[in-house]
Image (cartoon, grey):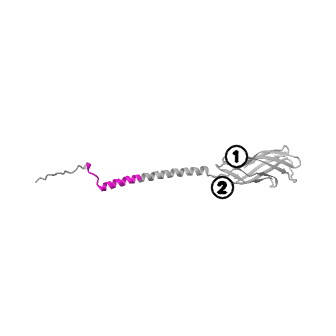
């Protein structure tokens, strides 16, 4: 007995997806989107961390400034007093300003006897620049000096204390030591063998 079929089955290619297939495909696309967001966030985090580290190692690396003494002039009065004038160069190697306190420097003989003093006034050095300060001292030769060669070896010392000011909020203390050895030629009133460390 043949039955008359009024509604044939629909072809399989236009059949709508079942709920299970739809949920699986939706889950896979959500999973891919989530992985893409995580990958983008991870790469952005690495990039920003690199920028911050580069900034820290370049701009926030605090170095001690350098100090040296140059262009020294000597005038001998002949009565055991010597006028000493020089230029002190303070070089700030940081990307931030360096403010320093007034400093008392000494001129000592090789036997550590102080024969003169000079003052470096307080001030500030701009970032990545060098400041020049003029100093003067009166050197009084010791009466016990028995120098037939006319050469007097001396050591010039100073300890400068200051702070590197970052954003004018943070301050790092930095100390700069001046230590220069030289020889004063008393016969021609000149400096020889100047060496600053």
Rendering coords of residue 46 (x, y %): 51, 51
Rendering coords of residue 126 (x, y %): 68, 48
Circle nearer the N terminus (1, 2): 1
Position of 104 with respect to 57 (left or right) is right
Q: Secondary structure at mark 1?
A: strand
Verify CB contact (< 8 Å) between mark 1 and mark 2.
no
Residue numbers of the magenta segment: 14-33
Residue at image point 52% right, 51% down: 48
* Picture disc at residue 175: none
Rendering coords of residue 36 (x, y %): 43, 51
Residue at image point 59% right, 51% down: 57
Residue tagged 2: 172
Q: Indicate yes or no whether the magenta region holds residue 91.
A: no
Magenta residues: mostly which secondary structure? helix
Residue at image point 66% right, 55% down: 172
User: Mark 2, residues whose alpha carbon is within 10 Å: few (<14), some, or many (≥20)?
Assistant: few
Q: CA distance from mark 1 to mark 2?
A: 19 Å
Residue tagged 1: 130
Residue at image point 82% right, 49% down: 152
Q: Secondary structure at mark 2?
A: strand
Q: Which image quarter: residue 22?
A: bottom left
Position of 1 with respect to 110 (left or right) is left
Along the viewing direction, whichever of 190 and 23 lies nearer the viewer: 23
Along the viewing direction, whichever of 50 and 82 lies nearer the viewer: 50
Rendering coords of residue 150 (x, y %): 85, 47
As drawn, the residue found furthest toward the right would be: 79
As drawn, the residue found furthest toward the top would be: 188
Position of 44 with respect to 114 (left or right) is left
Q: Indicate yes or no whether the magenta region holds residue 26.
A: yes
User: Mark 1, residues whose alpha carbon is within 10 Å: few (<14), some, or many (≥20)?
Assistant: some
Along the viewing direction, whichever of 57 and 168 lies nearer the viewer: 168
* Viewport quadrant of the N terminus: bottom left
């Amino acid at each position: 007995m043949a039955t008359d079929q009024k509604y044939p089955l629909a072809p399989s290619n236009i059949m709508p997806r079942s709920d299970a297939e739809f949920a699986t495909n939706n889950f896979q696309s959500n999973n891919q989107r989530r992985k893409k967001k995580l990958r983008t966030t991870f790469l952005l985090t690495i990039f920003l961390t690199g920028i911050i580290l580069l900034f820290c190692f370049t701009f926030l690396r605090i170095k001690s400034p350098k100090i040296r003494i140059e262009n020294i002039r000597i005038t001998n009065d002949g009565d055991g007093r010597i006028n000493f004038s020089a230029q002190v160069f303070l070089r700030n190697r940081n990307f931030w300003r360096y403010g320093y306190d007034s400093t008392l420097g000494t001129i000592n003989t090789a036997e550590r006897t102080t024969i003169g003093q000079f003052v470096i006034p307080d001030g500030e050095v701009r970032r990545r620049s060098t400041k020049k300060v003029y100093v003067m001292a009166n050197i009084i030769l010791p009466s016990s000096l028995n120098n037939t060669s006319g050469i007097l070896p001396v050591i010039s010392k100073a300890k400068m204390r200051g702070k590197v000011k970052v954003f004018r909020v943070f301050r790092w203390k930095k100390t700069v030591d001046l230590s220069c050895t030289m020889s004063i030629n008393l016969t021609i009133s000149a400096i020889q063998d100047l060496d600053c460390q």
